[in-house]
Image (tube, helix red, strand yellow):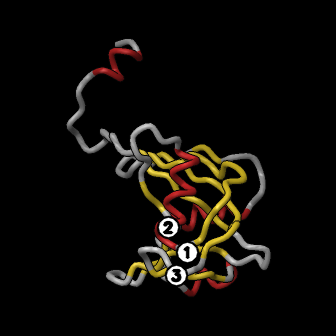
Amino acid sequence: MSQTDYLLEPRTGPYYRSTVTTSAVVVDDAGLLLMVRRPDSDSYHLPVGTPHSGETVSVAASRVAAESTGVAVEITGLVGIFDEPNDAFSVCFRGRPVGGKLGSGAAEAVWVEPELLDELNVPATVRQCVRHGLDLREPFFA
């Protein structure tokens, strides 16, 4: 089967993903990390969402961060591409705050000291993005 045939073949199993998500590891000048707390599970996540039709993933990452946290974010680089078989295909960026007001978004947003992440309920996939986001090496590809 050629790659084109593979890409065009309908998929219905658990490994078929049509969703691309975008997120951002946003760190302020004090070294604090922007996180969103989900009250239903008391877990902490990066601002994450899906691009709108015609929107690039980097623009979506900035928009999603602003909508969910109230913080305007400038994208400064690529953290990596995370491809988990049973999860969405995710593109994670680095960013920095450039305005806005924390807490004026749709979710409960907080600034977190990266050293305290081990004390919080942070899913493993989010920890992986954060770890690579704080490490300023080349982009990560899963």
Q: Position of residue 55 (x, y in %)?
A: 48, 42
Is residue 17 in sight in this rendering?
Answer: yes
- How many numbered marks appear? 3
Q: CA distance from mark 2 to mark 3?
A: 25 Å
Q: Earlier along the polypeptide chain: callout 1 or callout 3?
A: 1
Q: Which mark is residue 124?
A: 2
Of the residues shown, which amino acid type is indicated by label 1? Met
Secondary structure of residue under mark 3: loop
Q: Residue at x 42, y 74 (%)?
A: 106
Contact between labelled residues 3 and 1, with CB atoms less than 8 Å apart: no
Q: Position of residue 109 (x, y in %)?
A: 52, 79
Q: Residue at x 64, y 85 (%)?
A: 116
Q: Which mark is residue 35?
A: 1
Above or below for 120 versus 94: below
Q: Dot 3 surroundings within 10 Å: few (below 14), some, or many (20 or more)? A: some
Q: Dot 2 surroundings within 10 Å: few (below 14), some, or many (20 or more)? A: few
Q: Tell us which disc is closer to us: 2 or 3.
A: 3
Q: Which residue is mark 3?
A: 103
Of the residues shown, which amino acid type is indicated by label 3? Gly
Q: Tell us which disc is closer to us: 2 or 1.
A: 1
110 or 116, which lies in front? Answer: 110
Q: CA distance from mark 2 to mark 1?
A: 14 Å
Q: Position of residue 67 (x, y in %)?
A: 47, 66
76 or 12, which lies in front? Answer: 76
Q: Dot 1 surroundings within 10 Å: few (below 14), some, or many (20 or more)? A: many
Q: Which mark is residue 6?
A: none
Q: CA distance from mark 1 to mark 3?
A: 11 Å
Q: Residue at x 62, y 48 (%)?
A: 80
**Residue occupying the far left of the picture:** 12
Is residue 125 in sight in this rendering?
Answer: no
